[in-house]
Image (cartoon, rainbow, N blue to C red):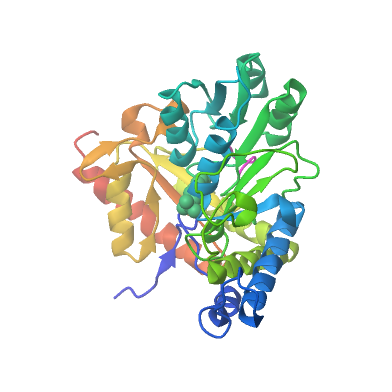
Amino acid sequence: METRKVYLDNSATTSVAEEVLNAMLPYFREHMGNPNSLHAWGREARRAVDEARESVAALVGASPNEIVFTGGGSVSDNLAIKGAVWSAPEGKRHIITSAVEHHAVLDTFKWLGKRGCSVTILPVDEYGMVSPESLASAIRDDTLLVSVMYANNEVGTINPVEELGGICRERGVLFHTDAVQATGHIPIDVHKLPVDMLTMSSHKMYGPKGVGALYIRKGIKLTPLIHGGGQEFGLYSGTENVPCVVGMGTGARVALRLHEAGEAGRVSELRDQLLDGITSSIPDSFVTGHRTQRLPYHASVCVRRIEGEGILLRMDFAGIGVSSGSACTSGSLEPSHVLLAMGLDHATAHGSVRLTLGIDTTREDIGYVLEKFPPIVETLRKMSPYK
Ligand SMILES: *Cc1c(COP(=O)(O)O)cnc(C)c1O
């Protein structure tokens, strides 16, 4: 009987690190104060929130007063984009994004497109990358904002953010990047990057779900989505989620320490072993996304003549957690918008599998996956209507 459990879906969410959980626990009972209260309980909660803000700021090279805590990556994306549009000067109604964004960005753009904004969606190349040239030629006199993700969640490709941001800065256009998959995993320094706003999410970097942050460069004005008590510099009202904010701050410190200890090198070696192992042992399989400009923990492949969901279910049965690139919403199989934008046809896009490594992933785990994956494909292909 198989007892091994191998979680390879860290792009969907990571486990809360033990150190993070331990840091959070006192803020549920012992230090349960509201940071907006003036007594000792409140002051302790405020101190903890301030400390977390410093830790998150340090992770990306920002000042603490440029970090706003929110309810997660999706909230930060919405705040950055809608907040900028709702504060836009007269005549700036054009906004630009890419075809491979997370839905928190893409659907926000589509929604704004129905409400008076003019929207341009940039194409990507075969690796899912946005080219600086295509961005440069899309910017117009009435362009307000560009939002292009730092690294893609489905195929792991890292965009040339420095060049993209540089073009925006030169043309006087705001630049936002959804860095949820990148923060804590590859070095980011907003001092050196021409980025105006940057989205982070705690649960993609060893912290709890339901909390995120938005870096907002000093001087940029946004309209809040939520009005109320004026917390978070007036940009995200509501009593701070102190335990989770503390968790995000601790997660940021854990990420920084892991990075300094060479975690990226360790996982990228395992990732390459996994990608090489899959493509050499499974006929008609190939890597999706860029081979080198890629998140260290991210592996994604397409297996021709197979449904990714079938692989996912059989891998699950073998104790392995992966994701199929296509979003399967109650029976209707829509292939991934990312893979289609990269030029894959529908049938091929259906065969996508994403395997994302984490701090707990070992060499033995990779060996186990490489043992299970090929026979699963072989079985599915025998049953397949294609051939
Ligand atoms: C997970 C993810 C989000 C959403 O973050 P939540 O905290 O789950 O709302 C946004 N963008 C990307 C690229 C993601 O991977």
On screen, residue 348 versus residue 264, left or right, reads left
Image location (x, y in percent) of residue 75: 50, 48
Q: Residue at x 53, y 57 (%)?
A: 204
Q: Residue at x 58, y 54 (%)?
A: 230
Does residue 236 appear anywhere in the picture? yes
- Residue 67 inside the magenta-drawn segment: no
The total number of labels drawn is: 0
Image quarter hosting the N terminus? bottom left
Image location (x, y in percent) of residue 308: 33, 45
On screen, residue 113 versus residue 132, left or right, reads left
From this view, report whether residue 189 is shown above or below residue 118: below
Image location (x, y in percent) of residue 150: 62, 40
Image location (x, y in percent) of residue 236: 55, 52
Nearest the eye: 132 or 7: 132
- Residue 152 figure quarter: top right
Q: Main secondary structure of the magenta part?
A: loop
Does residue 159 appear anywhere in the picture? no
From this view, report whether residue 104 is shown above or below residue 51: above
On screen, residue 342 versus residue 93, left or right, reads left
- Residue 293 inside the magenta-drawn segment: yes
For the record, the magenta segment spans 290-295
From this view, report whether residue 7 is shown above or below residue 334: below
Nearest the eye: 292 or 239: 239
In the picture as drawn, the residue positioned furthest to the bottom comes out as: 30
In the picture as drawn, the residue positioned furthest to the right comes out as: 192
Q: Residue at x 36, y 26 (%)?
A: 345
Nearest the eye: 321 or 66: 66
Image quarter hosting the C terminus? top left
